[in-house]
Amino acid sequence: QVQLVESGGGSVQSGGSLRLSCAASGYTYSTYYMGWFRQAPGKEREGVAAIDSDGSTSYADSVKGRFTISQDNAKNALYLQMSSLKPEDTAMYYCAASASAGATWYALDSRGGPHPASFGYWGQGTQVTVSS
């Protein structure tokens, strides 16, 4: 049973940094691609960043140069380093894994980030609040 548990969220002032972590269990981590998504109140869920088993990454245009996705296959862990945070980054952040092992391709949305339809497993989320 795939389980994803996020941590590291919190409140920070504009310009600050946070590092989100996602602990994965119940499957062979290295065979899935992984992603981070966020959802603000009243808005649809949007893709932030994704990484595949080879380490190739993609980012939404709004976070390029500020966020970095990484993973540690030995620890079954996914990370999102967020810097130069802005109030518009305030949202619930979710970790997600591809729907099946060995999947090599995920769709991108209009913002350049991963499309949620390409992911089948989701964590419960961790809240990030950025104040001005």
Image (cartoon, rainbow, N blue to C red):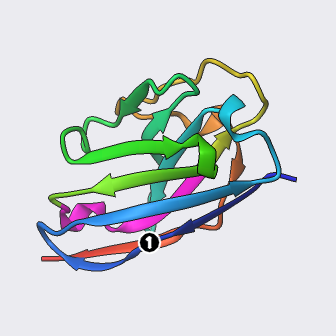
Residue in the picture at 68% in, 54% down? 24
Q: Quadrant of residue 82?
A: bottom left
Q: Quadrant of residue 18?
A: bottom left
Residue 59: give x, y in percent of width and height.
35, 35
Count residues near mark 1 (Cα–Cα under 10 Å), then give few for <14, some for 14-19, many for 20+.
Answer: some
- Span of residues in magenta: 85-95
**SS under mark 1:** loop
Q: Nearer the viewer, residue 16 or 87?
A: 16
Residue that extends furthest to the front in the rendered view of this protein: 74
How many marks are shown on the rendered structure? 1
**Is residue 86 on the magenta stretch?**
yes
Instruction: For residue 39, say whether it is visible.
Output: yes
Residue in the picture at 80% in, 44% down? 27
Residue in the picture at 28% in, 48% down? 67
Residue 2: give x, y in percent of width and height.
80, 52
Residue in the picture at 43% in, 43% down? 70
Q: Is 11 left or right of 29, judged from the image as shown?
A: left
Is the C terminus in the top left, top right, bottom left or bottom right quadrant? bottom left
Residue under label 1: 8
Residue that extends furthest to the top in the rendered view of this protein: 104
